[in-house]
Every structure is written in structure tokens, then in C-alpha cells.
Image: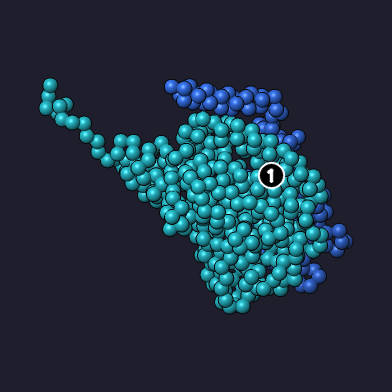
Amino acid sequence: MSETTQAPLTTEEIVVNLGPQHPSTHGVMHFVVTIDGETIRECVPHIGYLHSSLEKIAETLRYEQFITNTDRFDYLNGLGNELCYVQAVERLLGIEPPPRTVFIRTLMAELKRISSHLVYLGCYGNDIGAMTVFLHAFREREPLMDMFEAVTGGRLLYNYLRIGGLRNDLPTGFTDQLHRFLDYLPRRLEEMNDLLTSNRIFIARTRGIGILTARQALSFGVTGPTLRGCGVPYDLRKLRPYAAYDQVEFDVPSFPEGDCLARHLVRMEEMNQSMRIIRQLMEKMPEGEIQADVPRRIKPEAGEVYERVESPRGELGCYLLSDGGAKPYRMHWRGPSFYNLQALPVMVRGGLLADFIATLGSLDPIAPDIDR
Amino acid sequence: MWAAICDIWQGGKSIIIGHTVTFRNFWRPKITDRYPHSKPEENWQPKPGYRGGFAQLKSDKEDRELRCIACNLCAQACPVGCIHIEGEGKGKERHPVAFYIDMGLCVFCHQCVEACPVDALTMTEEYEISRTSRAGLIRDLDELVAAGEGRQEVSRVV
């Protein structure tokens, strides 16, 4: 036997590039992962592939023109982003929208939350090898997309909210469509729980994987279902109610484990809570005007405002600085995916490479929301 | 030992439950369309207020052909600046001589339609708006008028 084969087996660290075009990275993201055998030693996310310079574009557009761009960074939560933006501008102008408008906005944001979580559910199943759930989740999302189309005229990019109002009232037949959907969805969610959440393989791949402690999560500024999956019931809808959330009853689900399964369960329960909110909103929906009196040329006084809402991914914030002109002097967005992704290296360190995708998928990141 | 058997039993049961769901779905109606091989007309129709291709509407007045008064408000409302208008005439006789919309730049936000004071510009339910060249995406006045043939109302959710 030669000298070399008798030497003890050693492993060395190698660097693997995951992305930018990996099928499971939820958009164009690039991760440089240092692995020792199957174990991840270090992970460095490289972002910026989808940087679209929206904050700079905002400085060249009038306040009412920018609404169309808010749909475009977190594309699964278009109406929630619009809600955040118009609330910021309304606070800057000192306008109070009519009650019916507030209710319709809240309703749309909650429908969008269900739609976003359904996409998460499908993609997460796909990430960890359960392709069927993807098809089921996208089929259940279809009636939702039809509803958005009927209300706003678009399926993905809405441009529905206006400063002090809405583009149009709810169309005829919307209430029936919505109630049919609300009767139908819980059964389908139950079916998807049978298919995925209670599946033994799914549980084995998510329980105890990608653990983030509450202290770590708070120090990284992680919000949304990721934080609630660490046992911190932090939800802006409850803590600082905006729009019509102070008039409805709902619970904030939270699970203390901090692993992928806890984050998944938070999202599944949030869909039920969203349905509960929508039912209450439809019951209490007031009649009346949908547009407040807004000056023809929107020129807020010099000042600044920071508005935040709970998006399906976490705390979405919009900072506006006005110098008294028709265009914002500076605009900044706090995208929840960006802050949530910072915690990824901590979550995957010491784990297996195969669990990396499961952990990334459980954060539900949206690439344009990270880069903007 | 007993724990391991229970484990296998539980695992097997969850997989059988999952397969039952898949099996049930064999009998549910298909919702997919083989678009573009088949037109989706049965399952999907654009709703009123759908934001598709643009059109210019004809005037019902005797003395003018188009409603458009070339006031440039739509071009000012556009966030991307994809509308270009050249007008002619003063006062009541003002009408467009050239009207271009670059559909490659357009973000389909509907703000131009809402800005129009005379309800001349509208979006239609036309959804097959792709072309084979960039130049083909730029719609001129003739194409816009042809797209609005026979239409009276601007796009609006009802």
C-alpha cells in the first residue's frame, strides 16, 4: 500500500455558489456557501441583482404618479405596499380618507395577504420536493386573482389606491364572489394541511431546522412570520392599529420553536385569521363616499413622515421627506425581506447544505423587495 | 422498538392521507387552458375595467372626428412619459395630428385615462398586445382610432 492511502481521511472546506440562477432561490439571489463535507460553515448572501432604483425614481415623479411603482418591489403584496404609501402621503397632507375607503383598503390588504401566503405555501412545497402542493396552491389562488382583476382591472399590478381614496368602488357581484371564496378556501386549506403540514417527510425536513432564537431575531430586526415563529407576537396590526384593524377582532399566532416548521405554521394560521378579519370587514362595511377632498395639485408642506404597515413578510415602512414641492425630496422603503435575509447566515451555520433551501424558503423572501 | 413501529405507522398513515387528497383531485374539473392553442373564452373573459391595449374614441358631434382635444393632460399624468402628442388649431377646433403611445414603455397604470377631461383615451379589453418588433409596439393615431371602432365608453369598473 502506498503512503497516501494510509494517511487519515481529511476533509477540506470548499466554496459553493448557490445562485444567481438557482431554481429555489426565489428570484435572482446569490449565496456563497462555504461547506465542509455536507455541513455549512459560512454563508454570504450577495444581493443587488434586481436593484431597480425605485427610491431615486420616486424623486422624479409626483406623489400621485409614484403609486404605480409601489406595486413593483414586493410584487406579492402590491395592495399592501400601496396602502403603506398612500397612508404616508395622507399623513403628510393631513387628509382623512372616508370610512368606506379605509374598510376596502383593509379588505384588499388582507386578501393580498392570503394570496401571498398561498404563493409561499406552493413555493415552499416546491423547494423541499413536494411539487403537488405548488399546483394546488396556485389553483386556489386563481379565484383571488379573478377578484383582484374585477376590482382593480389588473391581476398583478393594481394601481388601485389613490391619495385620499380609491380608483373605483367595489364592482357589482363582488360580495357574492368573495363569500363563495371564503366558504371554499378553508376546505382547501385543510386539504393542503393533509398534503403537506401533516406529512411525515415534511415534518422531518422542517422541525428543528434553521433555528433562530428570539434574541437573535430581535437583534437582526427580523419581523413578520419569521419573528412570530420565534415566539415574539409582534404584529403592527395589533400593536399600532392602522386602517380599520382597530375595528376587527383577530389573534396573532406565534410559535416558540423558531424553526422552519414554526414559521410555516404561523403562515397557515395567519390565513385563517385573515379570513376572520375579512368576514368582519364585510359585515361592518359602511356605505358612502370613497374619495376625500384632495387638492388638485398635491403639494405637502415641508416635513417628514414614517409610516409602517404589516406586510405578509414583516414590517414594511415608508419614509417620506418633503421640501414643499410636488415631488418627494427623498423616499426610503424598509423592505422586510432585506432585514429577514440578514438572519439567514446565522440560521444555516452548522446545518446541512440540503437544509439551506428549506431555511431560505421558510423566510419567504422576495428578491425585488430585498434590492429595490 | 414499539416507538419505532409507531413511528413507521404514523409516517405511512400521513403519506396515505396525502395520496388520498391527490386521488380525490382526479375527479375535480380541470381549470387549465391550453392557451394559446385554445382561446380561454369559456373560462376567462377580461372584466370591465381591464387595462389592456389603448384606443382613441370617436366623437358623436358633427363638426369633429375625434373627441381628443390635444390638451396634453394624459402625457403629463403618465409616470413613464410614453405618450407624445402634436396638436393643431385653437380653441374648439383643436385636434391631434400625431398621437403616439409607446406600448413598450407603458406600465398600464390607467392614469392617462383618468386624466382625460373629454373621455377620449381609453384602455380596452384587448390582451394580445405583443408585437414582433419594438417599432411595432408604438401605436400611432390611426391604430388607436381603429382599436376604438364602435366603442363609446371608457374603461371603467362597474
Characterize the local packing of mark 1: few (<14), some (14-19) or many (20 or more) Cα atoms within 10 angstroms: some
The one of B3 and A100 positioned closer to us in this rendering = B3
Q: Which residue is mark 1?
A: A144
Secondary structure under badge 1?
Answer: helix
Vertical placement of B151 versus A359: above or below? below
Using the rendered view, name the quadrant where residue B90 is placed: bottom right
| Residue A59 screen position, x and y as percent | 54, 68
Residue depicted at x 64% and y 75%: A299
Q: How many marks?
A: 1
| Residue B77 screen position, x and y as percent | 66, 65
* Rendered colour, chain A: cyan
| Residue B143 screen position, x and y as percent | 71, 51
The one of A341 and A298 positioned closer to us in this rendering = A341
- For the N terminus of chain A, the image quarter is top left
In the displayed orientation, state which residue is furthest to the front: B2
A193 left or right, relative to B38? left
Badge 1 amino acid: Leu
Q: Is residue A47 visible?
A: no
Residue depicted at x 75% and y 71%: A293
Using the rendered view, name the quadrant where residue A220 is placed: bottom left
Image coloring type: by chain
Residue depicted at x 52% and y 53%: A232
In the displayed orientation, state which residue is furthest to the right: B62
Vertical placement of A52 versus B40: above or below? below
Q: Disc 1 is attached to a residue of which chain?
A: A
Using the rendered view, name the quadrant where residue B140 is placed: bottom right
Q: Which chain is blue?
A: B
Residue depicted at x 72% and y 63%: A165
Vertical placement of A274 versus A209: above or below? below
Q: Is residue A290 visible?
A: yes
